[in-house]
Image (spheres, rainbow, N blue to C red):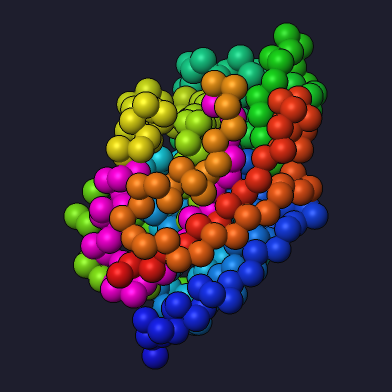
Amino acid sequence: MKASKTDLRAIASGLTFETLLSVNNPKSVHGIYPYRGKISAIDAARVVNQFPTGLTLLDPFCGSGTIVYEAARAGLKSVGVDANPLASLLTEGKLQITSHLDTAVSEAVDVVARAKTGRVSILKKESAGHFHSDTWREISRLSARFESMSPYLKACFTGALCLTARGCNWYKWTSSSVGKNFPTKQYVDFYRKFIEKVSKHHFPITSQSTVHLGDSRKIASFLRADSCDIVFTSPPYFDCLDYTSYYAKIVFDVLGWERQRIRGGLIQSFREYEADMNQVFSELSQVVRPGGLIVFVVGDKKIHGKVINGGDFFREFAPWKHFRTIERSYSGTSSKVFDSINKTHRREQIVMWIND
């Protein structure tokens, strides 16, 4: 039975967001890929477990599917939307882990065995310069089998690319950012890294959750009116973080995706950010049922030397009556390093509205 309008107000009133001492959980499914700016899986799980099971939760900026996966695991029907094909691929990969580990590993071993046989052209890509030549041959062979892989294996392939690029550059790159391109490369067995990814991040769930490769500025064109009970999301950073850069550039290049075209379709312009989000809010008002709950996790950002409070920014133009805001300090994250450099003390805001 779905919660009533009164129930969702009561839930919103009682929602808690703890300050996290650590956001690291590398052995979870979310370690498949180092997606930029993703919300902590620990945080997402704590929040979605406070919602009644059986409700439909929408994340209109789902990224690599952290909230969508954790909501599905908690017994909600979750719906993810993202205009970035890499985000959609990763989310679908997590939601489609339906096989036993032995079956998934067997599929990976079989794909590798097939990749090793037959004649395959070595990819002529800019990204080849990040890898040892022997490693690149393995990447070229396995990428030729990419379309035949299950969604979970496709996600693992992209994560293995990132990890292997780090390894070929002597692990001097960080887990989330590309660093110096060393002239002498270390050989890394890409086949092995791929199978290790499949083995390490296999956490299957059973759900009816889905992901849409689409634009949330047009979300009412592909989601039914009043079909969602809750929106829970961490929207694109409003200092316009480029979600197609760093490791994603390598993935896009290997898979032959047009990065500039994809980037142009994302919310990437600070000048147009407010107008874009106004459009998203208008669409959400249509797909969220009356009395539905909207929860945005945002944060302070330093732009042109000025720190902007994320909660204040969104509250000014949101079409719904402000219901509640929780503010907390960053803790246990890399943001503390940037605060030290920029001489700031940034905070995070969780802003809630009721769709009245």
Is residue 140 toward the left or the right of residue 164 in the image? left
Residue sitting at 65 percent across and 64 percent down?
17
Res 200 → quadrant: bottom right
**For the N terminus, which image quadrant?**
bottom left
The x, y position of residue 150, in whole percent, is 47, 54
Residue farthest along the left direction in this orientation? 221
User: Number of labelled discs?
Assistant: 0
Q: Out of 230 and 24, give the one closest to the viewer.
A: 230
**Eyeballing the image, is 144 above or below 184?**
below
Residue 53: percent from left, percent from top: 49, 82
Answer with left or right where residue 21 lies relative to residue 235: right
Foreground of the two, 175 or 136 = 175
- Is residue 149 among what the camera can see? no
Residue drawn at (22%, 67%), measured in percent from left and top? Answer: 225
46 up-or-down from 274: above or below: below
Quadrant where the C terminus sits is bottom left
Q: Tell me, yes or no, whether the highlighted magenta stretch contains residue 249.
A: no
Q: Is residue 43 left or right of residue 263?
A: right
Which of the two residues, 11 or 309, is positioned nearer the viewer here?
Answer: 309
Query: Which residue range is magenta in the image?
Result: 277-303
For residue 135, side relative to residue 7 (left or right): right
Q: Residue at x 26, y 53 (%)?
A: 282
Q: Give the quarter of the image for residue 127.
A: top right
Q: Is residue 182 visible?
A: yes
Position of residue 88 measured from the top left corner of the image (x, y, whole percent): 42, 48
Residue plotted at (37% across, 23% down): 260
Residue 143 position, x and y percent, is 50, 35
